[in-house]
Image (spheres, rainbow, N blue to C red):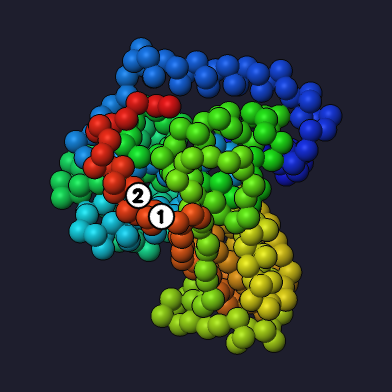
Amino acid sequence: MQVSSKLQNAWHGRGLLTALLLPVSGIFALSAGLRRALYRLGILQSQHLPVPVVVVGNITVGGSGKTPLTLWLAQEFQQRGWHPGIISRGHGREIHSRQVSEVRADSEARQVGDEPLMLKRRSGLPLFVGQDRVAAAWALLAIHPECDLILSDDGLQHYRLARDVEIAVVDARGLMNGRMLPAGPLREPAGRLRHVDALVLNGPVKLPASEIATFQLELHGTTFYSLADPTKTCTAFELRHLNLAAIAGIGVPQRFFDHLTGLGLNFAAHAFPDHHRYRAGDLSSIRADALLMTEKDAVKCSGLTERPVWVMPVTAQVTAAKAGSDLATHVEQCILEKPHGRPPA
């Protein structure tokens, strides 16, 4: 969902703009609650898969760190002997946006979405995209029957897909003003977080005390690679004397800019809308010796400029917020202990 920066800024408080939108929020909340109830009562049917399903999602609009966490989980489960596949809606697709498609390493972002393409190139795992996650999962299993686990990158509200484990990610913005769309950032009421299997906090997040297993997510990245030649790498120290510009078309661009600042770099920041489709003119208008960007942006920028472009990949590190098992072990236990295909909360 694309929202204006003015509205996103308003979500941090309860001013006039958000107050005026409260009637619309009421309608949205009623619709979301009714739909969830229909699935819970079995009037609308969730579709079960023959393998466990783990959904990584959130209840707020905007990037919270779901995709890096999905990649981390995929790698962890591979190490434990599982054979995961990944499904995603494929946000940002411009071609055949309603069709189910397999993501390949040489796919185009406009066909499969920027985050799925990034995930495919980083993980190498079977990955399918589709607005209908159930159809995407069945297509994946038909071509890759060796997969014994499905990870859904986003889809917490896609109740048609029965799931065994739900993981909700909350970033440092928290729940902001706590209101439902469009008067606030929430896709579902805050109470929805009491019914997930695990909470993952990306940054210093303040939430009410909960008995839900809680984990801390940190994203790390210190080495850049060249967009033109990914085998060529450099550190922030090697870039410090250049006239740099950083671009970010992600849910929270400031998160990337803060990361670069933390590496000691000086740069001009250029924020673009989430899932922005870059064109040569977007980059040529930026004055700099070299450009810095996220991997999500990089999959859409090959060949758009002759200047050096340095890409910052990040890796997730997940730790338990309290003494207890690690996230992968917790998820694995949930899979083994729960009835296959839990109903929606």
Give the residue type that dot 1 points to: Gly
Query: For numbered disc 1, what is the local secondary structure?
Result: loop
Residue carrying label 2: 330
The quarter in which the C terminus is drawn is: top left
Residue 63 visible here = no
Above or below, 44 relative to 277: above
Give the quarter of the image for residue 40: top left
First in sequence: mark 1 vs mark 2: 1
Location of the N terminus by quadrant is top right
Q: Residues within 10 Å of mark 1 (few under 14, many from 20)?
A: few
Q: Please tell me which residue is depicted at 67% across the width and 30% down the height of the picture.
A: 179
How much space separates mark 1 and mark 2, taking CA atoms?
A: 9 Å
Q: SS at mark 2? A: helix
Residue occupied by mark 1: 324
Q: Residue at x 39, y 27 (%)?
A: 344
Residue closer to the observer: 8 or 94: 8
Q: Say if mark 1 contacts mark 2, CB within 8 Å.
A: yes
Residue 246 on image: x %, y %: 66, 68
Q: Is residue 313 visible?
A: yes
Of the pair 69 and 274, the residue shown nearer to us? 69
User: Residue pushed farthest left?
Assistant: 145
Q: Indicate the position of residue 57 as horizontal and vertical percent values.
A: 47, 42
Dot label at residue 160: none
Going by the numbered disc 2, the residue's amino acid type is His
Quick one: label 2, few (<14), some, or many (20+) residues within 10 Å? some
